[in-house]
Amino acid sequence: MQRTEIEQLGEFGLIRRLTQEIKHQQSSTLLGVGDDAAVIDSGDKRVVISTDMLVEGVHFDMSYAPLKHLGYKAVSVNLSDICAMNAIPTQITVSIAVSSRFSVEALDELYAGI
């Protein structure tokens, strides 16, 4: 089996490769997988949806990133994607994956930034 390093394709090349066979199953999907956001036709308006995962050691370093700032960054990168699609952000959803090394108070601090 051939081994291609992700960095050879880059972000956009990887997205194209992984999604080239995906067909939209819903006619309401106006724009699917991409860099910034998806666009869904909800009937009376278009809805722009974005999600970005922030990975420790890649997008932030816990040794100097306060959790409150990390919460703020998590929202900001998604709002930026919505704005890049010329849309107005109105709502957010939050998904987090944390290990047991974090206390409840630490997560309170993360949410204070959100």
Image: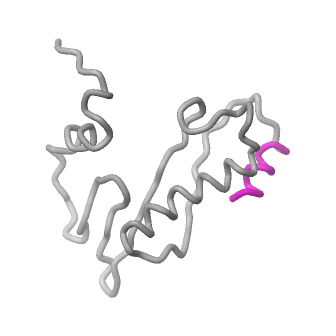
User: Which region of the structure is painted magenta?
Assistant: 105-114
Q: Residue 60, located in which quarter of the rendered image?
A: top right
Q: Position of residue 103 (x, y in %)?
A: 82, 37
Q: Nearer the viewer, residue 26 or 20?
A: 20
* Relative to 59, residue 77 above or below: below
Q: In the displayed orientation, state which residue is furthest to the top.
A: 1
Count the numbered circles shown: 0
Looking at the magenta stretch, what is its main secondary structure? helix
Residue at 49%, 62% (x, y): give it.
80
Q: Residue 10, located in which quarter of the rendered image?
A: top left
Q: Is residue 52 magenta?
A: no
| Left or right: where 74 falls relative to 84 | right
Residue at 27%, 37% (x, y): give it.
14
Q: In the displayed orientation, state which residue is furthest to the bottom.
A: 44
Residue at 68%, 59% (x, y): give it.
114
Q: Is residue 113 magenta?
A: yes
| Left or right: where 82 falls relative to 105 | left
Q: Quadrant of the N terminus?
A: top left
